[in-house]
């Protein structure tokens, strides 16, 4: 009985740590009871279908604690990588808002309980809706399934592998965010050059007064043109996960 409970605890720890910081599932708007029930049901399912990677009959109390800590570390690393890749669209929206001059504009995000910029939050919400409409939430279950196929309960990758995956995901988040925002950055650069020429040609014109509404209008137009790229990133996300996740 104790061996069965330890095996279930190992599986529950990895899944709980993974879903703790996972986008969508980790939102504060989802009731805690729903999160706990979903985690326990998934853990019971995987405990019934996946074998353990160790022999739990001779595991001591200290070894059991270390195994649980290892499973939690592995689950958190998987969740951090997925969260980093999900933050690409929000990062691109924040870059656009800085170019629009809306850096100080903040709203309360009821999903995460943190303050965020309105345009970045809107683009992230559109991305989440597109992701869910494409049955992207099934990808989370596939990640868990592949993690147990590669590293059964009680075995995890090395710390160097987990650390490298998280750091590489952070670098990929910055690169992908800049790549998505690159067309908008180019448009704002052209706008700044045009305003500079206008300031030289018409010195009496108040360029600062004119630039603010022009930058906001251009930012909204470019944000509307940005939506097809968001839809394209939904299909690209699975490829990034396959490359970066240690599974």
Image (tube, rainbow, N blue to C red):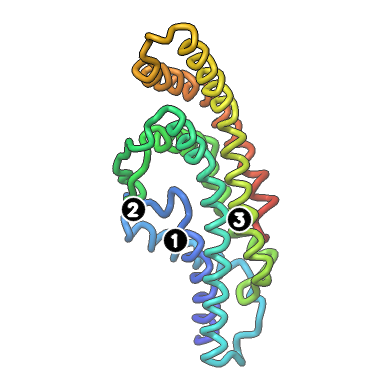
Q: Residue at x 42, y 27 (%)?
A: 100
Residue 151, position in %: x, y? 67, 68
Q: Which residue is mark 2?
A: 28
Q: Decide if residue 245 is on the left or right side of residue 230.
A: right
Where, quadrant-wise, is the C terminus in this rendering? bottom right
Above or below residue 203? Residue 54 is below
Picture quadrant where residue 166 is located: bottom right
Looking at the picture, how far across and down is residue 74, in whole percent?
58, 67
Distance of mark 3 from mark 2, alpha carbons?
A: 22 Å
Mark 1, residue position: 20
Distance from disc 1 to disc 3, alpha carbons, whole Å, reads 15 Å
Residue 143's tag is 3
In this view, the residue in front, 130 or 53, is 130
* Image disc number at residue 55: none
Q: Residues within 10 Å of mark 3 (few under 14, many from 20)?
A: some
Disc number lying in front (1 or 3): 1
Q: Secondary structure at mark 1?
A: helix
Q: Is residue 151 left or right of residue 94?
A: right
Q: 154 or 202: which is nearer to us?
A: 202
Q: Position of residue 188 (x, y in %)?
A: 52, 23
């Amino acid at each position: 009985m104790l061996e069965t409970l330890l095996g279930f605890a190992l599986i529950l720890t990895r899944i709980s740590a993974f879903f703790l910081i996972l986008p969508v599932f980790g939102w504060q708007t989802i009731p805690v009871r729903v999160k706990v029930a979903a985690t326990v049901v998934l853990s019971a399912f995987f405990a019934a279908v996946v074998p353990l990677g160790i022999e739990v009959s001779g595991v001591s109390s200290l070894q059991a604690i270390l195994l649980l800590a290892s499973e939690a570390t592995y689950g958190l690393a998987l969740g951090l990588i997925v969260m980093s890749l999900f933050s690409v669209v929000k990062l691109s929206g924040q870059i656009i808002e800085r170019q629009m001059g809306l850096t100080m504009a903040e709203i309360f995000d009821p999903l995460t309980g943190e303050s965020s910029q309105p345009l970045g939050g809107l683009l992230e919400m559109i991305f989440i809706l597109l992701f869910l409409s494409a049955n992207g939430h099934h990808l989370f279950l596939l990640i868990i399934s592949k993690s147990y196929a590669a590293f059964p309960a009680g075995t995890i990758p090395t710390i160097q592998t987990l650390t490298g995956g998280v750091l590489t995901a952070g670098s990929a988040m910055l690169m992908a965010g800049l790549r998505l925002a690159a067309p908008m950055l180019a448009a704002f650069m052209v706008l700044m050059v045009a305003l500079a020429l206008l300031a030289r040609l018409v010195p009496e014109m108040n360029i600062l007064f004119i630039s603010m509404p022009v930058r906001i209008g251009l930012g909204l137009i470019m944000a509307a043109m940005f939506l097809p790229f968001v839809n394209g990133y939904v299909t690209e996300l699975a490829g990034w996960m396959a490359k970066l996740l240690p599974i």
